[in-house]
Image (tube, rainbow, N blue to C red):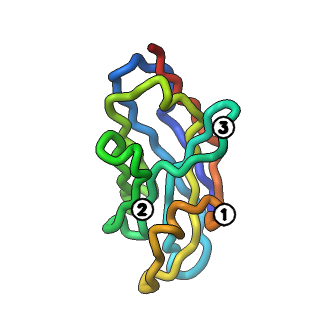
Amino acid sequence: QVQLLESGGGLVQTGGSLRLSCSASGRTDSTGAIAMGWFRQAPGKDLEFVAATNWNGESTYYSDSLRGRFIISRDNAKNTLYLQMNRLKPEDTAVYSCAADPVAPKAYYSSNYYSDPTEYDYWGQGTQVTVSS
Protein backbone atom coordinates (compact mmCIF):
# COMPACT_ATOMS: atom_id res chain seq x y z
CA GLN A 1 0.00 0.00 0.00
CA VAL A 2 1.11 3.53 -0.78
CA GLN A 3 -0.17 6.57 1.07
CA LEU A 4 0.06 9.99 -0.56
CA LEU A 5 -0.19 13.35 1.15
CA GLU A 6 -0.20 16.61 -0.78
CA SER A 7 0.79 20.00 0.56
CA GLY A 8 1.64 23.47 -0.70
CA GLY A 9 -1.68 24.61 -2.05
CA GLY A 10 -3.15 27.99 -1.26
CA LEU A 11 -4.27 31.34 -2.60
CA VAL A 12 -2.02 33.17 -5.04
CA GLN A 13 -2.43 36.14 -7.37
CA THR A 14 -2.36 35.87 -11.13
CA GLY A 15 1.22 35.58 -12.32
CA GLY A 16 2.44 34.11 -9.07
CA SER A 17 4.02 30.75 -8.34
CA LEU A 18 3.38 27.82 -6.04
CA ARG A 19 5.17 24.57 -5.41
CA LEU A 20 3.13 21.53 -4.50
CA SER A 21 4.59 18.55 -2.73
CA CYS A 22 3.36 14.98 -2.46
CA SER A 23 4.87 12.80 0.22
CA ALA A 24 4.66 9.05 -0.37
CA SER A 25 4.88 6.38 2.29
CA GLY A 26 4.63 2.60 2.19
CA ARG A 27 5.58 0.44 -0.78
CA THR A 28 3.93 -1.94 -3.15
CA ASP A 29 6.48 -4.66 -3.79
CA SER A 30 10.16 -5.50 -3.56
CA THR A 31 11.18 -2.83 -6.05
CA GLY A 32 9.01 -0.08 -4.62
CA ALA A 33 9.07 1.54 -8.05
CA ILE A 34 6.11 3.82 -8.68
CA ALA A 35 5.14 6.16 -11.46
CA MET A 36 3.72 9.38 -10.08
CA GLY A 37 1.60 12.13 -11.48
CA TRP A 38 -0.44 15.22 -10.81
CA PHE A 39 -4.04 15.66 -11.85
CA ARG A 40 -6.43 18.52 -11.18
CA GLN A 41 -10.15 19.06 -11.06
CA ALA A 42 -11.84 22.41 -11.24
CA PRO A 43 -15.42 22.88 -10.02
CA GLY A 44 -17.86 21.43 -12.51
CA LYS A 45 -15.12 20.04 -14.73
CA ASP A 46 -13.61 16.64 -15.39
CA LEU A 47 -10.40 15.40 -13.89
CA GLU A 48 -7.49 16.73 -15.97
CA PHE A 49 -3.98 15.39 -16.40
CA VAL A 50 -1.30 17.87 -15.40
CA ALA A 51 2.07 16.09 -15.42
CA ALA A 52 3.71 12.78 -14.58
CA THR A 53 7.10 11.21 -14.12
CA ASN A 54 8.44 7.71 -14.45
CA TRP A 55 9.76 5.79 -11.47
CA ASN A 56 13.20 7.41 -11.35
CA GLY A 57 12.31 10.88 -12.59
CA GLU A 58 14.28 10.59 -15.80
CA SER A 59 11.19 10.85 -17.99
CA THR A 60 8.50 13.48 -17.58
CA TYR A 61 5.18 14.02 -19.30
CA TYR A 62 3.04 17.14 -19.46
CA SER A 63 -0.33 18.29 -20.59
CA ASP A 64 0.34 20.21 -23.78
CA SER A 65 -1.51 23.23 -22.42
CA LEU A 66 0.63 23.38 -19.27
CA ARG A 67 4.06 22.52 -20.64
CA GLY A 68 6.45 25.39 -20.07
CA ARG A 69 4.66 26.79 -17.02
CA PHE A 70 4.58 23.72 -14.80
CA ILE A 71 7.55 21.56 -13.88
CA ILE A 72 7.31 18.13 -12.29
CA SER A 73 10.15 16.53 -10.38
CA ARG A 74 10.70 13.88 -7.75
CA ASP A 75 13.21 13.11 -5.05
CA ASN A 76 13.13 9.38 -4.38
CA ALA A 77 15.50 9.75 -1.45
CA LYS A 78 12.78 11.82 0.21
CA ASN A 79 9.87 9.87 -1.32
CA THR A 80 8.47 13.17 -2.54
CA LEU A 81 6.95 14.40 -5.77
CA TYR A 82 6.87 18.09 -6.63
CA LEU A 83 4.98 20.36 -8.98
CA GLN A 84 6.39 23.82 -9.56
CA MET A 85 3.66 26.04 -10.98
CA ASN A 86 4.66 29.35 -12.52
CA ARG A 87 2.80 32.26 -14.12
CA LEU A 88 -0.42 31.03 -12.60
CA LYS A 89 -3.74 31.98 -14.13
CA PRO A 90 -7.27 32.01 -12.68
CA GLU A 91 -8.09 28.98 -14.87
CA ASP A 92 -5.46 27.01 -12.93
CA THR A 93 -7.76 27.13 -9.91
CA ALA A 94 -8.55 23.54 -8.97
CA VAL A 95 -7.97 20.76 -6.50
CA TYR A 96 -4.62 19.21 -7.36
CA SER A 97 -4.17 15.54 -6.56
CA CYS A 98 -1.13 13.34 -6.54
CA ALA A 99 -1.36 9.79 -7.90
CA ALA A 100 0.93 6.79 -7.92
CA ASP A 101 1.05 3.44 -9.68
CA PRO A 102 3.42 0.49 -9.21
CA VAL A 103 5.58 -0.12 -12.25
CA ALA A 104 8.25 -2.50 -13.43
CA PRO A 105 11.44 -0.41 -13.58
CA LYS A 106 12.69 -1.92 -16.85
CA ALA A 107 9.36 -1.97 -18.66
CA TYR A 108 8.25 0.59 -21.25
CA TYR A 109 5.18 2.67 -20.55
CA SER A 110 3.69 4.96 -23.17
CA SER A 111 2.83 8.60 -22.61
CA ASN A 112 -0.83 7.59 -22.79
CA TYR A 113 -0.31 5.43 -19.72
CA TYR A 114 1.05 8.33 -17.67
CA SER A 115 -1.78 10.68 -18.59
CA ASP A 116 -4.59 8.20 -17.94
CA PRO A 117 -5.99 8.58 -14.40
CA THR A 118 -7.50 5.09 -14.52
CA GLU A 119 -3.96 3.62 -14.58
CA TYR A 120 -3.13 4.93 -11.11
CA ASP A 121 -3.90 2.77 -8.09
CA TYR A 122 -3.20 5.28 -5.34
CA TRP A 123 -4.44 8.81 -4.82
CA GLY A 124 -3.96 11.56 -2.31
CA GLN A 125 -6.74 13.67 -0.86
CA GLY A 126 -5.81 16.70 -2.93
CA THR A 127 -4.79 20.27 -2.18
CA GLN A 128 -6.70 23.37 -3.23
CA VAL A 129 -5.02 25.93 -5.45
CA THR A 130 -6.85 29.20 -5.96
CA VAL A 131 -5.56 31.86 -8.32
CA SER A 132 -7.13 35.28 -7.88
CA SER A 133 -7.50 37.68 -10.79
Circle on res. 118: 1
- Could you classify mark 1 by the number of other residues whose Cα lies within 10 Å: few (under 14), some (14-19), or many (20 or more)? few
Q: Residue furthest bottom?
A: 106
Going 55% across and 82% down the picture, which residue do you hit? Answer: 30
Describe the element under mark 3 as helix, strand or loop. loop
Label 2: state its secondary structure.
Answer: strand
Left or right relative to 125: residue 30: left
Looking at the image, residue 125 lies above or below residue 89: below
Check disc 2 and report the residue beneath it: 53
Which one is earlier in the sequence, the residue at label 2 or at label 3? 3
**Looking at the picture, which amino acid does disc 1 mark?**
Thr
Q: Is residue 108 above or below residue 130?
A: below
Which image quarter holds the C terminus? top left
Residue 96, position in %: x, y? 56, 40
Q: Amino acid at mark 2?
A: Thr
Which three-letter amino acid code belongs to the residue tagged 3?
Lys
Q: Which residue is mark 3?
A: 45
* Image location (x, y in percent) of residue 94: 57, 33
Residue 127, x across and y down, in percent? 58, 35
The answer to whether 70 is drawn above or below residue 11 in the figure is below
